[in-house]
Image (cartoon, rainbow, N blue to C red):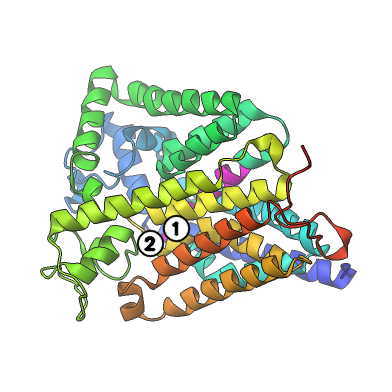
Amino acid sequence: MPDTLLARRATFALVTLLLAGVFVFSFERARRGQWDFEHFYHDARHVYEHGALPAVLDPTGGDAGRRLPFYLPSVAAMLAPLAALGRVPAALVWAAAQVACLGYSLRTLGRWLARANGNSGGLTTLLLLGLPVIYEAARFNQLSFPVLALLLAGLNALEGGRRARAGAWLGLAIALKLLPAIALPWLALKRHWTALSAALVALLALATLPAVVAYGSQQAAVHYREWWDFNVGGDAARGLIAAERREHFLDYRNQSIAQVLARLTWAEHPYRLAWQPLRLAPGQVALVANLLTAGVLVALLLLVRRPWQDLDPDPRRGEIALVGLTMLVASPLLRQYYLVWALPAVAVMLAWRASRAAGLRRLGWIGLIAWGLGMLAWLSPPARSAGANLVMLLLMAGVLGWGLVTSRGAGATAAGGSPPGPLRPPRAG
C-alpha cells in the first residue's frame, strides 16, 4: 500500500521522538557516571592522565582496576581525547554519537523495508518490535549502536562500489568490538579482496598506532601481552564460566552458548538450573561450547558462500543480517544490549511479509514470532537462565539461512511488482 503524507509524518515523528529520547537517556547516564560509559571513560581518562591503562586487570579493583580488559588496549587510547574533554562534554559527544549511529542504522533498515513494502509502515513496525533492545542498548550506553552502524555502513559502501571504504568501516568495527571479525571470511567468500585488504589494514593500524602513541611501543606491547593472557589464555577463551566471576557473567543475563550450557550441565555452577539433563565438568562445558560455536560459524560460511556478483541486493542484506546474528551467538558474553545487532534480521523478516512466495512469508512469520516470544521471555529470569534468548537467535538464524537457501531457485515475485524479497533469486548466468 502506498504511503500517505500522514503515515510518513507519523513515522518521522516516531523516529525523531525515539532519537531524542535516546540522546537524553544516554547523556544523563553518562553525566552521572553510570555504566557502561563510565567504564570507557574511566580507562580513557586514566590513559589521558597517566599514559597507561590501569594496572589491575580485575574490573572490581577500584580506581586501579581496568574496566575494559576484554577490549583491545587501543580502544581506551582512541577514547583518551574524548575523556580529556571532561565528563560532561564527553557525555555530550558520546550521546550524540549514539544517536547518530542509531539514526543511520534506522535509515538504512527503513530503506530495506520501503523497498519491500513500498511504504514507511515497515519501519514503524520495526521500531515497535525493536524498542526493548533499543532501550537496553541506550541504557547500557555501550558500543552496540556504533558497531551496528559500522556493519551497515560497510554493506552500503560495498553496494555503492566503494570497497576500500567498506573495508575501513568493518576494520573499525572489529577494532572496537572484535566480534565483527566474523565478517572477514564473508568478505573473502564474496571475493571482495580490496575490501578484505582494507579491513585488515584498518584493523592493524587502529590496533597499533593509537596504542603506540598513547603508551609508547614498550608499554603498548606490555598491555597487549596482558590482554592476550587475560582473554585468549584465560577464562574468556573458555566461555567465562569460572565460578569466581561477577554474577552478570554467570546468571540469566548472560545468554551465551557456554554459559547456558554450564547452567544446564555443571553441578557446581553458582546459578545452575534445578533440572540438569547432563552432567559435565567445566572443561567439558568449554569444549562442547567451543564445538557448538565452531559449528555455527561453519554453517554461516556454508550459507553465505555464493559470490557477490551472483547476488541481488536483497540476499546480500540477508547475508549481512545473518552475520549479525552469528556475532551474537558466538559471543562469550551475550547480554540484552547486544541484541540490536539482530535488528537487520528482524527487518529482513518483516520484508518477507511482502513476498508473493508463500514459503518466504511463512518463514518471515516464524522468525517474527520467535523474536516476539524472545522479547516476552525477557520478563522471565528462569526462561532466560535456560537460554530463551539464545534459542530465539538460533531459530532466527535457521529461518534466515533457510530463506537464503530456498530463495536461490525461487521464481517468486514480491508484492506490488517490486523485486522479490527481501531475498531475490540470482540472475540467470
Q: Using the rendered image of the protein, determine whether residue 49 is visible from the camera's viewpoint.
A: yes
Q: Residue at the spot x=49%, y=35% of the render?
A: 184
Read off the residue under disc 2: 335
Circle 2 crowding by C-alpha within 10 Å: few under 14, some 14–19, many from 20: some
Quarter-wise, where is residue 422 in the image?
bottom right
Task: Give the amino acid type for the residue marked by disc 1 in the picture.
Answer: Tyr
Q: In the rendered view of the protein, which quadrant contains the N terminus?
A: bottom right
Q: In the rendered view of the protein, which quadrant contains the C terminus?
A: top right
Q: CA distance from mark 1 to mark 2?
A: 6 Å
Examine the structure image and report whether residue 149 is included in the region drawn in magenta: yes
Image location (x, y in percent) of residue 105: 63, 52
Start-end of magenta stretch = 139-153
Left-right relation of 316 to 330:
right
Which residue is the extreme one toward the top?
A: 217
Image location (x, y in percent) of residue 224: 26, 30
Q: From the viewer's perspective, is residue 9 above or below residue 108?
A: below
Q: Using the rendered image of the protein, determine whether residue 13 is visible from the camera's viewpoint.
A: no
> Are the residues flagged by discs 1 and 2 in contact, CB closer than 8 Å?
yes
The dominant secondary structure in magenta is: helix
Q: Residue at the spot x=57%, y=53% of the render?
A: 321
Image location (x, y in percent) of residue 360: 68, 65
Image location (x, y in percent) of residue 308: 66, 36
